[in-house]
Image (cartoon, grey):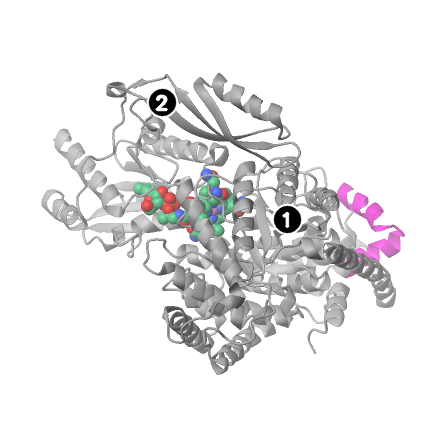
Amino acid sequence: MFIKPYGDTSNDGAVQLSFTLPVKNCGRAKEAARLYVQKLGFQKVDVVHAAALSEDFTFFVAYGKTDVSLDYDKVEYAEAVDKYMSMDEVNEFIKTHFKRKLVIVGACTGTDAHTVGIDAIMNMKGYNHHFGLERYPMIEALNMGSQVPNEKILAKAKELKADAVLVSQIVTQKDVHIKNLTELIELAEAEKMRGKTLLVMGGPRVNNKLAKELGYDAGFGAGTYAEHVATFVVKKLYERMTTRK
Amino acid sequence: MTPLKSKLGLSKPKIDRARELAAEITAPVQEFIDTHTTVTIERATLRLLGADGANDDGVPVPNLIAAQCGAKLSGGAAAFYLNALLKLDKKPAELNKEIEKGLNICEIPLTDAKRIQKKAEEIIKGLDARIAGNVTHRNAQLKLSKDKIKSPMIYVIVATGNIYEDVKQAQAAAHQGADIIAVIRTTGQSLLDYVPYGATTEGFGGTYATQENFRIMRKALDETGEKEGRYVRLVNYCSGLCMPEIAAMGALERLDMMLNDSMYGILFRDINMYRTLTDQFFSRMINTAADIIINTGEDNYLTTSDAVEKAHTVLASQFLNERFAAGAGMPARLMGLGHAFEINPELKNGFLYEYAQALMAREIFPEHPLKYMPPTKFMTGDVFKGLAMNTLFNFVSKATGQGIHLLGMLTEAIHTPYLQDRHLAIDNALYVHNTMADFMDEIEFKKDGVMARRARQVLDETVEMLEEVKRHGLFTAIETGMFAEIKRPRDGGKGFDGVYEKAAGYYNPVEAYLKKKLKVGK
Ligand code: B12
């Protein structure tokens, strides 16, 4: 199925844009904005708003229509898990299949000081009325907090024989998270933890696809709750256990 | 701006009780502060006496001197610097060059204490004149632009990491109508136990606070201010491990506001509590001497705690910040106490609670230029919804007569602001603030309505909390997570090893000057 943006009618390809150009606001600037949007591949370009941000910068809002379409059938994206279990279901699943508590260690690593995201997943209280992993009777959860060096979280995971490590990355400017996440993977590789301990990452600007590219088992973005991660962890561990047999 | 009678029916005796408790809570802490100094207080002192520059490895001169002093810091570093100026017969700039090259000034035998004191007086006279000159200049400019500065004042941030890009964005924002520009510091600067030197162009999520960067931005905003016929205030962060040094730099370079909180560093940066509490006192004396408005950080509590459940922790902290600041000689007009619009937008009547909280703060702190922070935690990638939330925030701010209005950015959840994000935010605020210009005077509230009841409840809970903090003492209260639900052990955290008990005969002429000027202490 080929798709195009829908504005007012099917396949009209209508797109809304806003951007700033480094020129003074005047008629010529507006014409430049129109030509620029045209160059991006849009037709029937309409620059509907122009405002001076200073003597040297102008902000524009524009609409355009595009001919570009995309074959939706060829788009590949796999969610970490298709169907999520509830907290109770996760606990039952662990009791039935593992007959022991699972150990999960998590932290916001590197220089990142944002704790609220990892707390939302791990702390008792949870987030938006979804309890965190600490509340799960069959999960032993340790939240190490923020600004935790990669070596430290891996060492802790080893010490506790953790089944899964959860890494939170909130700051993404200048790709600091990529550097830090890659470092953790390399350390895990050196420690021979990959393939044994599940490595899961999360944060508002990351997703499952990026996680896979970096070598993680899964990645979770904005709006994640503890049960989402828990479902992935128990199912993946179970899958590994049964395929190894 | 100051409401004559409480529209929320707040109890005066309760407010008085809260203030009394705050005084009782801070008194034992102040005793500790009075008998201690820190490595950064000593470095700040050196800076104010003229120490500046850095060696080839980027180690600042004040740090070089502090390292030379070692344990002698407990007696104060000033004497060594003053002594070296005398003995080598050099001006500070010349002496700094020698220290950069490796001169150890602590090895020079000390001359007569009277000569040192005389040298101190000479330098401090110049310091006092410089700071007074800054204050006079600012006040004259503010007077000229009186009718053009908005109420509340519109405050935006720049955070490119590159001071020269920051300048472009700051000038554009000032042109669009911003009254205040804050340069956000780079990730991690608060944990550096030194202040980097020189102009900088690389930072993550913010730009290094350096004295040269202060100077560059000050000059740029003065230029824009002249063009616009309106003085533009400059803000930076006087927090972290170098709090007093940054206060000193701000005083010298005519910053107008400083973020400065008595507990933020402890809670959100894991800095040792003795260190931060001691540092905040010295910093606030410098801020006061330079007529710099501080912004406290209570808004941050609501990122780790729920804004409805823990609203009283914000008010309790405001009382403590007020008391600590007063202890440093600061008048109310310089206390920009912080709070924020951070209630979950899905909560029914959340807006009424926000409105009640903001009005309550206004009524309890009538002369303080309250610093009101926008929604951040519940901002998402839905920038359109974000703009709507910011509009309601702008409304509450104007409807409650806030002093310093930090604009929300529609892209808060995504990146540090783009040029156009600030424009949209300023436009939104100007629209709201104009269309409801006299709204505050028009409106009254039901005596027992949702808002009045809410404000009373928060005040009640605040008094209860302060009673409890008093029972345990502030140190234990912080240890047990009573603020922001973050626990910090008293002997843990960064910077503890930089706290010194003042030795007998501790000598700090800058401290003495500040205390005398501000009538602080006995
Ligand atoms: C609160 C906050 C702070 C607080 C943090 C307090 C604390 N203890 O956490 C303080 C004030 C300390 C702070 C500091 C800074 N911040 Co900040 N902060 C925020 C803010 C407003 C909210 C973040 C938040 O709590 N969201 C709520 C939680 C629940 O959501 P979440 O983190 O996305 O988590 C969810 C999912 O992502 C996921 N998830 C997250 N982690 C994980 C991990 C796993 C394993 C899984 C499965 C899921 C998962 O599940 C969570 C629940 O659904 C955001 C803006 C925003 N609205 O996002 C900026 C923001 C993240 N901060 C930012 C910046 C730049 C900074 C500073 C660098 C500023 C500075 N110059 O000092 C410093 C960084 C200090 C440091 N060393 O990291 C930028 C980051 C820009 C970028 N893309 O890189 C943002 C986006 C603001 C902005 N527009 O500039 N910040």
Residue A73 in view of the camera: yes
How far from the left and from the top, in percent, is residue B108? 81, 55
Residue B44 occupies quadrant: bottom right
Can you tell which mark lies on residue A4?
none
Tag 1 and tag 2 share a subunit: no
In the picture, the quarter occupied by the N terminus of chain A is top left
Q: Is residue A193 left or right of residue B338?
A: left
Asked if B368 appears above or below B20 in the picture, the reply is above
* Residue neighbourhood size for the residue with mark 1, other residues' Cα within 10 Å, grouped as few (<14), some (14–19), many (≥20): many
Residue at mark 1: chain? B
From the image, tell me which residue sits under label 2.
A13
Identify which residue is drawn at 68% across, 61% down. B287
Foreground residue among B149 and B193: B149
Of the residues shown, which amino acid type is indicated by label 2? Gly
Instruction: Please state the total of marks drawn on the protein image.
Output: 2
From the image, tell me which residue sits under label 1.
B194
- Cβ at disc 2 under 8 Å from ligand 1: no
Q: Is residue B502 left or right of residue B320?
A: right
Q: Which portion, as a residue range, is magenta? A: B79-101
Residue at mark 2: chain? A
Query: Circle 2 sits in a helix, a strand or a loop, which is it?
Result: loop
Q: Is residue B372 left or right of residue B162?
A: left
- Is residue B479 on the magenta stretch? no
Q: Main secondary structure of the magenta part?
A: helix
